[in-house]
Image: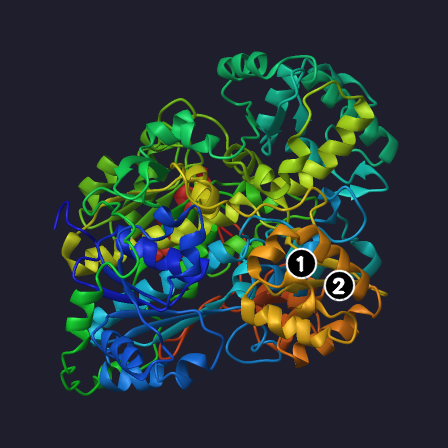
Amino acid sequence: MENQAALEGLRVVDLSNVRTGVQVSQFLADFGAEVIHVEPPGGSPMRADRAWPYWGRGKKSIELNLKDPADLEAARRLALQADVVIETFRPGVADRLRLGYAELSAGNPGLVYASITGFGATGPYADLQGYEGVVYAKMGVLWHVSGMAPRAGPAFPSVAYASYPATQLALQAIMAALYERETTGVGQAVSTSLAQALSAHDTPNWFARVMAQKFNESFKQVGRFENGAPAGGLFFRILLARTKDGEWLQFAQTAEKLFRAMMRMFGLDWMYDDPKWRTAPEFDDAAQRIEYWEMLLNTVASKTAAEWAEAFDRDPNVFGARISKGTELLDHPQMQFNRMVSETVDPHVGRLRQPAPLTRADKTPGKIGVAPSLGEHAAELRARAAVEPAKAAPASAAAKAGRPPLEGVTVVELATYYAAPFGATLLAELGARVIKLEQLDGDPHRNMLPFPEIAGIKALQGKESVAVDLATSKGREVAHRILAKADIVLQSFRAGVAERIGVDEPTLRALNPGLIYMAAPGYGEGGPYGHRPAYAPSISAGAGWPWRNAGALFGSSGERSLDDIKKEGVALAHAVSGYGNADCAAAVSVATAMMLGLLARERGAGGQKMFTTMLSSAAHAVGEMMVEHEGGGDMPVPDRDLYGWSALYRVYDTAEEWVFLAAPSEREWARLASVLADEARLADDPRFATAAERKRNDADLAEVLGEIFLGRKAADWERIMRAADVACVVCARAPVEAHYMDEGGIGRLQDWVTEAYHPILDTVPRMKPLVSFSRSSTRADGAGLCGQETEKILREYGYSAEEVSTLAKDGVITLG
């Protein structure tokens, strides 16, 4: 099957017209599935997006009015012939249309039916419109990033922190169900939500809150800043600083070795011999942290960006990524080297540049098609829909067992921190066995915060740890014995490391020809940046996330005082990471790539190498701005004060607290105007009579609505608006994790939280798996300590008790 499409022969019907659904079907089209996009009369709203050539590429288009019985029947028949159906309706809508899973699966038992909602199919918020901003508001994100706005109150981030992971989670569930179908012959319904997907970003904050709740005053949960000072050493390890010529650099010196290299480059390594500074970057005194911060800022400000780039070239252990703007990432030397940028001539828009398929697959490479014109394939698809579907065969009895879809799959992880490892965690939740081979003192992620383990728990859940020194020949022998029986190996090393320690693809392929070799570095396996350290903020910066969130902060390039630089730096620190981060974008993309490799192998491709990078995954996460062509619509951008995208999609102050309003469609505007009829005759105001007039007079509309919202409390507005089916909700206060784990929080109300065991913390709350299956089960296991399963696994793989003891005595392994 070499050089064939991984998903060739699969038929997908996409009933969605929002970003999540169309990005799911885009990936499936890129890898060979036939994707039929069912568009409403006049076309999908996504066609107005400047990134439509990216969202719609490689699909077929048919225009159907689902309120028309004949068109609805055509849609139903296309779905009955499909392998996969994707829908993003609010819960219950598909069933009312007779396009729900229960009815379709009765006539098509092999169907995999994917649903993506805002808050899930059940629970107190199931009926709430699933706009990303609404999810952000209810989960505390808008207050979490308030520091990036030049005003008081919650701020609006533009990066798709919820939508992008939701697309990847849906893809993983779809492909896991297809993988399981290869054995049982039967499909099932799969689902996720934006609110669940949003939680994939959180790394240490969740367990920092667990600690604070368990130990009360003994462990205090703090933000990034405390009384105007950076709260801890991590802030300095991921320093954000302005150069002499006004560029902002985001550093990634998380490991101690990397941080000390930066201190040497800055000429500040003398501090380690000075009693006042020797604990750098950790200081108890706030005034000392501020003084230290100013020293670092002044050092970076002493050189231009080009001068720093030359310094970075001399020392590969130090790197500050320049914050890019707009589509500059498409010109990034590493993106070009990795072949992660597509440049074509599109028949509709001319010269077109966009991200290449999400993962490179050696045997089953992706291929970018052209986005269709509206209804381009109507004749072909209506003819197909005119054929009466064949009577379905009864479901296999083997399909009723409810086992995890990846039961029997073994993943061996050779990765650190979060960007790759959490991808393996997601497969563990689908039933895969994940064996983590980590260095003798553990994945550095375990000890990134002052209290050991809590920073890394989330990416360690569901895994078995073997502590082994791969720099030794005996350690490599241990790894090779385990890898010889694995289905997937995941590694995230910088360029050259895998070859140096004998876990490169040719070496492992010789041991295990059927192996799926997943390489997921920060930048690449070679090229100009492959040797550089990568961390979430530096990748976010290089991919332009802070520019997407707060482009107005990048206005003037003139001189700045140190106080101004500090203020801008604080705002940009919130814009770089916001609530979400590039680690999550990379991790969910890694999981998708591994699932594609596994499914392709099951369909006859055999073992192959898969490749993603943090940088390219970050490009897909902001895909709406990573498209260049002549003409097209505008990309939505927030206002300078970061209220939102428009008067009908933004935050408003009220008599008490703030609300987020999302009423951009014509129907929602009519409902909103009706609710507010007593306050203002909006429907009769000529400035707001049509969508075009509302857009032209957006500032006036925002002013009118702003005055109205000040008349009531936020909670009252939510009650009134929801009763009229208008999405207007209270902007919940941070921290975000509280709204998942605390009693009475949305996570508890939606039954998304369970309990797991940890050897140090005992019973702790954790999110349940972020996807659900109608028939298969999932797993929500706890995390262990470094080397906890070393002896057990070595014995399982044929080592005697005496051999294990000798390896431990020789320092090759650590026994937990």
Q: Is residue 11 left or right of residue 341?
A: left
Q: Is residue 287 left or right of residue 261?
A: right
Residue 509 location, x and y as percent? Answer: 21, 42
Check residue 213 in the rendering and tell me which mark sits there, or answer none.
2
Residue 208 location, x and y as percent? Answer: 69, 55
Q: Is residue 150 left or right of residue 23?
A: right
Residue 442 seen in this snapshot: no
Instruction: Find numbered disc 1 in the image and state the secondary structure of the residue it sits on.
Output: helix
Q: Is residue 355 left or right of residue 707?
A: left
Residue 461 location, x and y as percent? Answer: 51, 59
Which residue lies under the disc numbered 1?
687
**Closer-to-camera residue (485/725):** 725
Q: Earlier in the sequence, mark 1 or mark 2?
A: 2
**Quadrant of residue 111 in the image?**
bottom left
Residue 172 seen in this snapshot: yes
Q: Report the amino acid beneath label 1.
A: Arg
Residues under numbered marks 1 and 2 in contact, where contact means CB atoms less than 8 Å apart: no
Marks 1 and 2, how far apart at CA: 52 Å
**Closer-to-camera residue (65/109):** 65
Picture residue at 76% right of the left edge, 24% below the top:
278
**Quadrant of residue 611 in the image?**
top left
Picture residue at 58% right of the left edge, 15% below the top:
308
